[in-house]
Structures are given as C-alpha cells and as structure tokens.
Amino acid sequence: MATLIQATEVSKVYHKTTVPVNALNGVTLRIEEGEFTAIVGPSGCGKTTLLNILGGLDHPTQGKVEIDGTDITTMKDSDLIDFRLHTIGFVFQAYNLIPVLTAKENIEFIMLLQKKSKKEREIRAIELLTRMGMVDKANQRPGELSGGQQQRVAVARALASNPRFILADEPTANLDSTSASNLLDLMAEINREQKATFVFSTHDQRVMDKARRLVTLRDGAIISDITR
Amino acid sequence: MLARIAWRNVWRNKARSGVVIGSMIVGIWALAFGGGFMQSFLTGYIQSAIQHEISNGQIHHPEFDKDQNIKYSIHNPEKILTYLSQQKSVKKICERSIVNGMISSSRQATGVKIVGVDPEEEAQVTQLGSLVADGEYFPHVSHPVLIGEKLAEKLKVKAKSKVVLTFQDVHGNITAGRFRVAGILHAASLVINESSAFVLREDINQLLGIPDAVHEIAYTTTVGTDDLALSNQLTKMFPDEKTESWQELSPSLVFMQEWMGAILKILIVIIMLALAFGIINTMLMAVLERIRELGVLMALGMKRSRVFTMIMIETIFLSLVGGPLGLLAGYATVSYLGEKGIDLSNYSKGLEAIGYENILYPSLGLTDYSQIVIGVLITALLASIYPAWKAIQYDPVEAIHSL
Ligand SMILES: Nc1ncnc2c1ncn2[C@@H]1O[C@H](COP(=O)(O)OP(=O)(O)OP(=O)(O)O)[C@@H](O)[C@H]1O
Ligand SMILES: [Mg+2]
C-alpha cells in the first residue's frame, strides 16, 4: 500500500495562555491508502490538534506533514484552501451542514466549489444519498433531520469531492450509541467498498472497536499504535 | 448557488431582515417625501415670485437700477416689444413706468414705489388682478391706485379712501396727484404688501411730464424656457438696454435654490447614515451568529473571497427587497399629494409673511428617484463591507471551536 499521509516529528505549542501548552510532542505517523484508523485518547491529549494539522487547517510549530509527497506545512493559506477542497473530506462534530440548504444541495455545494457541472453534481449527490440511505430525505433541510441523519449527509458530502482521504473529528460525539454505531458501520462499509481512507478521532469505546488501526495519544504523544 | 444561499439566509431570521427592510422602506419613503416636499416648497416660492413679482425677465435702461431716476427710460420700447412678441418662448409682456415717491393719507405718510401699469397687460403678466382682496381692479374711476394690505393698515385707509402721491417730475419739480384707493391687495410678497402703489401708466406719465416713457418691460416665458439664455439673447439684440432673467434679478432665489439643495443633501446623508448603521448592525449580528457555519465552509475549501461575496449578496438582496418597496411608497405618497396638495393654511400665517404659498404640490423628477435608488444601493453596499470583512477574519479552526 502506498503512503498517503506522512507526519514527521510534528509538535504544536499554543501560546495563548500564560503557560505554553504542548498540545503535540513530536508525533510521527504514517497513514496508508485505504486505512480505517481511529485516533483515541483522553480529553486534551491532542486528537483535534493532530487532525487539524493533518488536514491543513492548522500549522504545526515544528515538523512537517506530507500528503502524497507534498509538504503542506509550508503551503500558503490560500493554496491550502484549494488543497483541502480537492484532497480532503471533512466531517466535524457538529454544525457541519449549511442550514439553509437541503441535504442534496449541501452535497452539491462542495462540488460546486470544485466547479463540477450541474449534471455531474446531481447524479453524484443522488448516488451518495442513496448509498447513505438518505435519498428519501434529499430535499429536507438539516433542521428537519436527526443528528445521525445529519452526520450521514456530512459523510456523503465529504465523499462527494472525491478526496484522497476523509478526516472526521469526533463524528459521533453528539449521537446516541445506536446512531453512532450505525454511522461507523456505514463508514466502514464505504471504506471497504470504495477503498476510501478514513481517519477519525473518538472517545467512544464502541466506535474504537470498529477501527482497524488504533492510534492512542497521551499528552500529545503516541503511546500505542495497534493494527488489527 | 451562492445567490441561493444568500437569498435563503436573508429569510432565515425574518424578524431581523424585516426590520432592515422596513427601515429601508421608511428611509427611502422619507427621502422621496422630504425631497418632494422641499422641491414643492422651493418651486412654489420661486414660481410665486416669478408669477406675481419679478416675471421671468425684465428689461431696463442700464442706469435705471442704480437710483431709479425717471430720466432713465428705455430707449426704444416699441422695437423691443415687437421683437419680444415675435419670440415663441415669450408668453406675455407688459410695460411699466416707475417712480419712487411718497404716499400720504390724512393720517400718515410713507415712502412708496409707484408703478404705472397697463391693467390688462399687467393682469396677464403678474396676475395683479387676482390679488385684489377688497375693492376692484382698476375700475373706471379717475386716478385709481391699488395698494397692499400692510400699507393700507399703516396709512389707515380702506377701499375708496383718498391718498396723495408725491414725487419729482422730469424737470425736478415736486409734483403731487390725488388718487383714490380702488383696491387693496392681499399678497405674499412683502414688496407688494408694504411698499408699492399701482396706478395707471397714463396717469403717472402725465404727471411726470413724459407721456411715452417706459422704465420697465417685464415678460413671462413658456414652461421649459431657458430664461438665462433668453436674457442673454435679448442683451445681444438690444445692447443699449439691460435685460435680466429672474436669476439675475433675484440672486436670493438662486441662493435659496442652492441652499435647499444643500439641505436636501444633508437630509440624504443623515438618512443614509441611519440606514447604513441599521444594515451594519443587522448583518454583523447575522455574521457573528453564523461564525461556526462560516468556519466550516472555509474549512471545506470555500475561499474567503467567496464568503465575503456571499455576505455582500445577502445585503444586496435585502436592499433589493426594501428599495423598490420604499420607492413605491415614496412615489405613491408624492404622486397622491402632488395631485391633492398639502394644505398648510393652518401654519401659513408665518409662511405667508415670508412669501410662501399656502398649498404645496410635492413633485419629484425621475432623476431624483434614480438618485435615491443609487444612494441607497451604494449605502447598502458600503455598509455590508464591514460585516463581510468581519466574516472572513476568523481562522476556520478558531471559528469552528468558537462558542
Ligand atoms: N486554540 C487553542 N489555544 C490554546 N490551547 C489549545 C487550543 N486548542 C487546543 N489547546 C490545548 O491543546 C491541548 C490539546 O487539545 P485538543 O483539542 O487537541 O485535545 P483533544 O484530544 O481533541 O481533546 P477532546 O477529546 O476534549 O476534544 C489541550 O490541552 C488544549 O487545552
Ligand atoms: Mg477534540
């Protein structure tokens, strides 16, 4: 398998408080195409910080991150925006969807940013909604959907841009356990079927159990890395 | 899609957008109404001055202005009258003899401008006849005189009272004539009301000893005439006389016009400022409440410039809804009142004293309306810049994690 993400000696220090916070301490991590990997660890261990840096949303204080061999830590912010649009799919914990757009429009929106044609957008949006079991909710707005349904639309949107990998920071944190486990099953299926790479963080033991690789952080450092 | 999102965002908080749209409507309405009102005030004033007093233009001997000496009469009035009557833009013409003198009753005496007129001509040019409040307009009596209410009060005379006019004749001798007050004039103009006496031109010329003298020719013009251009043309034609349009005769009218224009501009600025703050406030709230959402958009790969544009479009949509409605309201009000008129007679004691008409007919031209529209659009655009700029100040990460 080819290396997709290579993080080398990544550190992040926050200086916002009087005492500097070492959110990440020299994290080195390699992620290959097709992985289904969970980043786990206690609250404050640096999961979000790591995912943000892997996704080009934040810059590390030290170290570098290469995606498909491209160093993204030296990229300008404006180039990073384009890079994210075409390379990375994001699922956040909450407030993922544009509230004034329907489920289908939310999915189309990301492809619109990519300047895909209207026809292509429509076909792909319907295809993804069908895959997520949400096609009957295509014309509903996020406010009319349950949390689990919203997250499924968010995953569909993340897939819509045909990214190289999908980053999901605690995608199930706001869901009840059944919805959480359903969402994870769906993600795992897509990972198997389409060889889509997923990297997600979680607190939830049941979600962790579904991961094939488990990277555990503590105090900003990797303390264990198990592949099952 | 950006437009669709913006449009739907406008209606996301209906009450808030409603307030902005409402204030836009009120602002534009106020502008249209205020503008129309002031316009009518101004035109009313100028029109009344032109119609009852100075006419669209006047011709004098070049020296006459200085001391109104009766020897400075117009060199060749016949030729000028013939020429004027051939001009399409000239409506009516009248000739006057003018001498400054004294008017005295049995009780009082005061300085007065004695104006000798041809009653028919004068009625057509200045509607002098319409001002007669008491008595008659030049009835067939010997030596009639018309004076204003104020003057009559001062002299303590009524219609049919006798007065004496005293002045110097062409040889410098003091001459006096007995006149009978034929009518009392009720005029907005101070000059007519307080210090003029209108007599027959033949009467005064005879007393002056210059039977054919004409000191003043006044003319009115058709609607839309460029009075300034016409007076220049007449000056070229008759270089021995001095022709002046109403603008030259009464610079205060022009000043007033400019002054009103300036007040209107200030009014516009004030209303626009209020509008701008309303928009800034609303859009800023709309932005701050959506920081997370905007952060997600930027994280996903939406360029800042697009986020900026989206917020701008939202504001434009707001004004596209509010603008036409306000314009419609303003137009409806101005048109309705333009037909019906605003009766100010309850307040007009003071107004009339300074020369205003009682009933105003507001009107606004197409240019005024388009100016208002452009003004509101520019204001809306400028006011949306700050909220839109604010929207893109956040890092996606910061925004997503902000509360
Ligand atoms: N923007 C920031 N400014 C200052 N300190 C920060 C910032 N973001 C995170 N930190 C600190 O960095 C450390 C790691 O935070 P991070 O959010 O990555 O942890 P996490 O593992 O995602 O925690 P959780 O499970 O609660 O989401 C924490 O100590 C946190 O207080
Ligand atoms: Mg976190």
Image (tube, coloured by chain):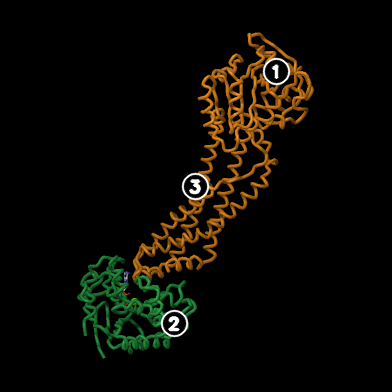
Where A49 falls versus B260 (above or below)? below
Q: Secondary structure at mark 3?
A: helix
Residue name at image x 46 percent, y 57 percent: B280
Q: Secondary structure at mark 1?
A: helix
The residue that mark 3 highlights is B269
> Residue A219: percent from the left, percent from the top?
27, 78
Instruction: Find chain A in the image and tell me its colour.
Output: green
Q: What is the drawing colour of chain B? A: orange
Q: How many marks?
A: 3
Mark 1, residue position: B202
In this view, the mark in front (1 or 3): 1
Q: Position of residue B26 (x, y in %)?
A: 57, 54
Q: Is residue B354 visible?
A: no
Of all chains, the one bearing label 1 is B
Check disc 1 and give the amino acid type.
Glu
Q: Quadrant of ligand 2?
A: bottom left
Q: Is residue B346 visible?
A: yes
Comparing labels 2 and 1, the label whose residue is closer to the camera: 1
Which residue lies at the image location 56% right of the left edge and 33% below the top edge? B253
| Callout 2: chain | A
Q: Which residue sits at x=65%, y=22%?
A: B96
Of B32 and B85, nearer the camera is: B85
* Residue A72 left/right relative to B140: left
Mark 2 close to ligand 2, CB under 8 Å: no
Left or right of B325 on screen, residue B374: left
Residue assigned mark 2: A149
Q: Position of residue B354 (x, y in %)?
A: 63, 33
Q: Position of residue B363 (x, y in %)?
A: 60, 45
Indicate the amino acid at tag 3.
Answer: Val
